[in-house]
Amino acid sequence: MTEVNAFLSERGIYMLTIILFFLGILGMITCGNYMKKLMCMNIMQVSVIFFFLCLGQKIGGTIPVAADGLFDSDDYVNPLPHALMLTAIVVSLGTTGVGLALLMRIEDKYGSLEEEEIIRKEKEDE
């Protein structure tokens, strides 16, 4: 049992990230509602951001600000993954905004966000 606890304490956060990622993929594949697909896409994006933030952490590391007695780079956490993920969050928000705007237009045109109903109405219009 201690081996399981040691594994979860060291690698459990990565397992949670993988589970969230695959839940997002599963939701995008199985859901027929476009709003649900957009939410599942956001879950995938959050899991990737979370993975990179966890990967950038260091045990015993401190923020990269000059402090007394800390001269070695091994004492600091690398700020690059955090800066990149901040950019990814902004891109994610932009993607979500565009997706919501498209969903509003789809709802106005077809009266629904269900994939099967939209395909049926599109075939009727042809």
Image (cartoon, rainbow, N blue to C red):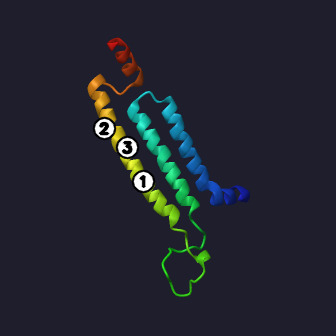
Q: Position of residue 29 (x, y in %)?
A: 51, 31
The three-letter amino acid code for the residue at tag 2 is Ala
Residue at point 41%, 38% (across, down)? 38
Q: Quadrant of the N terminus?
A: bottom right
Q: Secondary structure at mark 1?
A: helix
Residue at the disc numbered 1: 89
Q: Quadrant of the C terminus?
A: top left
Image disc number at residue 75:
none
The three-letter amino acid code for the residue at tag 3 is Thr
Out of 22 and 81, give the one closest to the viewer: 81
- CA distance separating discs 2 and 1: 18 Å
Residue at the disc numbered 2: 101
Q: Quadrant of residue 105?
A: top left
Taking the image as shown, residue 83 lies to the left or right of residue 18, namely left
Residue at point 38%, 25% (across, down)? 114
Q: Residues within 10 Å of mark 1 (few under 14, many from 20)?
A: some
Residue at the disc numbered 3: 96
Q: Residues within 10 Å of mark 3 (few under 14, many from 20)?
A: some
Q: Position of residue 15 (x, y in %)?
A: 61, 50
Q: Secondary structure at mark 3?
A: helix
